[in-house]
Image (cartoon, grey):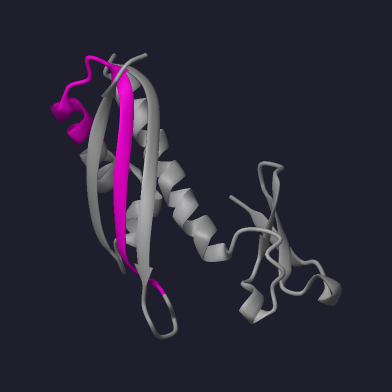
Amino acid sequence: MECTVRWTGADAGMSFVAETGSGHALVMDGAPEAGGRNLGPRPMELLLAGTGGCTAFDIVLILKKGRHAVSGCEVSLTAERAEADPKVFTRIHFHYKVRGKALKPESVERAIALSKDKYCSASIMMAETAAITHDFEIIEGV
């Protein structure tokens, strides 16, 4: 896996463009109080978003492989950071909303546990500094 991050220059404040090995680009920026211009998400926000994407991917894949009728998955993450540098994540809560037809709570719970303990590289790395908690709700429907 590869990624190149380039500062866009002094005229752009603290804006950076990341180009991924898979050929995608995204803009990151710092907070205005740190010289940013709010042109993109903060790097730590992207870490949190990537963690959410990683686990949501797992949940859908695990449920589909188990032949469950999953039709939607949303995960909301709330995080706390350390007060002093390095301001690592110290707590992250995952709230899953899984939609499908006749989904069993134990199947969703198992998918979440497998993601948390075995498959989601991002959340497993985050657990090195953060207390991870989760809950979920099942929404009936297609």
**Is 116 positioned to the left or the right of 109 in the image?**
right
Residue 28: give x, y in percent of width and height.
66, 61
> Residue visible at 38% across and 46% down?
76
Identify the residue at the far right of this view. 11
Q: Quadrant of the C terminus?
A: top left
Residues drawn in magenta: 88-111
Asked where in the image residue 128 lies, by quadrant, the reply is: bottom left
**Is 98 positioned to the left or the right of 18 in the image?**
left
> Residue visible at 29% across and 55% down?
93
Seen in the picture, residue 49 relative to 62 is either above or below; the reply is below
Residue 32: give x, y in percent of width and height.
65, 74
Asked where in the image residue 126 lies, by quadrant, the reply is: bottom left
Seen in the picture, residue 62 relative to 80 is either above or below; the reply is above
**59 or 114: which is nearer to us?**
59
Residue 105: give x, y in percent of width and height.
16, 28
> Residue visible at 31% across and 19% down?
100
